[in-house]
Image: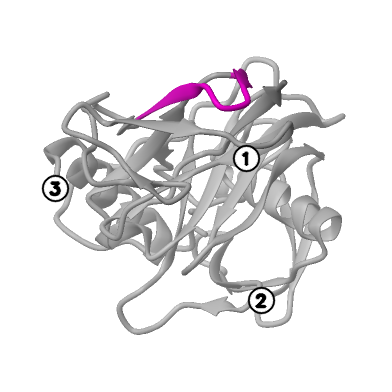
Amino acid sequence: MSSGLSGRRVRAALSALLGAVAVTVASAAVAAPAQAAPAAADTSAHGTVVRLRVEGRSGTIFEAPVFTTPHDVTTPSGGTHHCDGTNNGTNPTPGPTATGALDDGARLGGFTFDGTYWASFDDFFITRVAGDEQTATEFWGILLNKEFTPVGGCQQQVAFGDEVLFAFDAFSKSHVLSLSGPAVARVGKPATYKVVDASSGAPIAGATVNGATTDANGEVTLTHTAVGAVRVKADRADSIRSNSVLTFVAP
């Protein structure tokens, strides 16, 4: 497990247990000083577009751009509360947030989620997304641009183009996987993809990429057999699943 990821897990754990949602996911570990979430320069009360990804226990629940605005969020367990970054006095003005993006993504993607509300921190703690519910040892956590958020999802404002990731059992993982590869390939010709740790950039061996396994350099070669768009992802048991790479396979 990388020391960088351990430090991020610590800050995320504190925020999750005190009312954070990620993937993104509750937090656990040793103490590190929490930071205030910086308000994004281009955050506005009119909304923005972010790249939302939700990684469940055994697969990707949602991965697509989402237009999100500051708005009230309602969960079965937590009720209805504002979710605009001013929660707990974190930001001075309203703006789109990570949990707001999850809420908008749920409507767009046709899935549901739940979370308890902690009045002391004016924020939700996400307990379930789609059919994946937290357990005594597995929690949902949030990552923003591949880093665990230092505050809850209604406190964490987001900006145009941000990657917002909610991940199941995030705090037991050793790596956050990042996948890169070609946008265009040819039928029957080898196409190389690479998997690295999103924080350190270190290559990840032993990751599964559409059925093939990465080597010591984190690389794998796929030979696509049909024309069309192919979505490629990387997974490893001890890691948070990667982003997808969309490759158009030409004749």
In the rendered structure, are the residues bearing label 2 and label 1 in contact, judged by CB atoms less than 8 Å apart? no
Please indicate whether residue 179 sits to the left or right of residue 12 in the image: right
Amino acid type at mark 1: Arg
Q: Is residue 186 magenta?
A: yes
Q: Secondary structure at mark 3?
A: loop
Residue 20 x %, y %: 48, 58
Residue beneath the point at 50% across and 32% down: 223
Residue 148 falls in which quadrant of the image? top left
Residue 194 x %, y %: 36, 27
> What is the number of the mark on residue 231?
1
- Residue position marked by numbered label 3 in the rendering: 1
Whether residue 93 is situated above or below residue 26 in the rendered picture: above
In this view of the protein, which residue sits in the foreground, 155 or 52? 52
Please indicate whether residue 222 sits to the left or right of residue 136 in the image: right
- Within 10 Å of disc 1 (Cα), the crowding (few <14, some 14-19, many 20+) is few
Please indicate whether residue 213 sits to the left or right of residue 151 in the image: left
Residue beneath the point at 41% across and 60% down: 16
Q: Is residue 229 magenta?
A: no
